[in-house]
């Protein structure tokens, strides 16, 4: 969800499709610039027109600019709290931004936050809304989360889970090869190797984009190994092997770190 220097990717959190959130993030800032520009014009007019008071009175434009600046600060702090391992504090920020101009921008990081907090039913509902919305990369990313949440919360037999995952994955359509490879794994007809091969073959060679993709691939692949096949050793080996490739500004990174620590603690007890 994205990268936060820029995710969402979703996936960094400041990206919406996951790159589109950058534009959405810039939009309120652009508005802020416009409002400030109008304020400067008003001051200039006051200076050349002696019949108008030189004192600039607060108005709707300045109020709206301040509101946008406040929302932006809350959003950035919520994401920073998530990345710092403080999901409860982050939750407060996301809740403040619900039903504001930032509602669409926080959708993915807020949904990830719900999963981190163990509020799986709420996370499922949030990701379903994103996945069934506009056909963007963010929607495809949300579909992968639906597969992960199905495996994470399953209480039946492994065989029944695999059948359900295959049925669910068949309903999704992916335009990104690495996402399709992840879906194939959950459907029982893919492999971790195919996923990371797809990541390596990405046309976008920027380090940040690659790091985001590796982090997503590690998280979803590890989740499948842990919860669908119950192969904790394989999951731990994957998490440790891919540490050098992970993006510290991706929202999946704290989840991977938590899973790694839990698996290591389990191994030490046994």
Image (tube, rainbow, N blue to C red):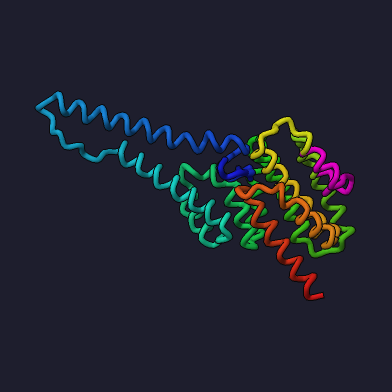
| Residue most extreme to the left | 51
Q: Write down the quadrant of residue 173 in the picture.
A: top right
Total marks shown come to: 0
Magenta stretch encompasses residue 97: no
Residues in magenta? 183-199
Q: Where residue 121 sits in the image (x, y, percent)?
A: 66, 59
Q: Which residue is at the front of the view, 221 or 161?
A: 221
Q: Is residue 190 above or below residue 47?
A: below
Q: Which residue is at the front of the view, 71 or 84?
A: 84
Q: Is residue 268 above or below residue 3?
A: below
Q: Would residue 60 appear left or right of 13 to someone viewing this image?
A: left
Q: Where residue 118 sits in the image (x, y, percent)?
A: 65, 63
Please state, as top left, top right, bottom left or bottom right, where the N terminus lies in the image.
Answer: top right
The residue drawn where x is 87% and y is 63% is 157
Q: Main secondary structure of the magenta part?
A: helix
Please state, as top left, top right, bottom left or bottom right, where the C terminus lies in the image.
Answer: bottom right
Q: Where residue 220 sits in the image (x, y, percent)?
A: 75, 50
Q: Which residue is at the front of the view, 81 or 267?
A: 267
Q: Write down the quadrant of residue 61 in the picture.
A: top left
| Residue most extreme to the top | 48
The residue drawn where x is 23% and y is 29% is 42
Residue 10 at least partly seen:
no
The residue drawn where x is 40% and y is 47% is 70
Q: Would residue 96 appear left or right of 15 to someone viewing this image?
A: left
Magenta stretch encompasses residue 188: yes
| Residue most extreme to the bottom | 269
Q: Is residue 118 above or below residue 170?
A: below
Residue 262 at least partly seen:
yes
């Amino acid at each position: 969800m994205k990268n936060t220097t820029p995710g969402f990717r979703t996936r960094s959190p400041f990206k919406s499709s996951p790159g589109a959130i950058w534009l959405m993030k810039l939009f309120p800032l652009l508005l802020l610039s416009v409002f400030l520009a109008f304020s400067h014009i008003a001051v200039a007019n006051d200076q050349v027109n002696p019949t108008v008071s030189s004192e600039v009175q607060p108005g709707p434009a300045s109020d709206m600019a301040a509101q946008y600046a406040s929302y932006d600060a809350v959003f950035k702090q919520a994401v920073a709290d998530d990345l710092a391992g403080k999901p409860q504090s982050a939750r407060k920020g996301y809740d403040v931004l619900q039903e504001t101009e930032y509602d669409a921008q926080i959708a993915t990081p807020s949904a990830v936050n719900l999963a981190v907090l163990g509020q799986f039913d709420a996370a499922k509902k949030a990701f379903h809304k994103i996945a069934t919305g506009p056909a963007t990369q963010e929607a495809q990313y949300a579909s992968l989360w639906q597969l992960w949440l199905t495996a994470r919360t399953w209480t039946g037999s492994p065989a029944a889970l695999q059948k359900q995952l295959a049925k669910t994955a068949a309903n999704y359509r992916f335009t990104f090869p690495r996402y399709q490879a992840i879906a194939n794994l959950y459907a029982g007809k893919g492999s971790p190797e195919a996923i990371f091969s797809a990541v390596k073959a990405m046309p976008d060679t920027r380090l940040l984009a690659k790091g985001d993709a590796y982090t997503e691939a590690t998280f979803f692949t590890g989740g499948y190994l842990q919860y669908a096949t119950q192969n904790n050793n394989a999951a731990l080996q994957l998490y440790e092997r891919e540490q050098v490739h992970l993006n510290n500004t991706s929202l999946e990174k704290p989840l991977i770190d938590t899973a790694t620590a839990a698996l290591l603690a389990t191994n030490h007890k046994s």
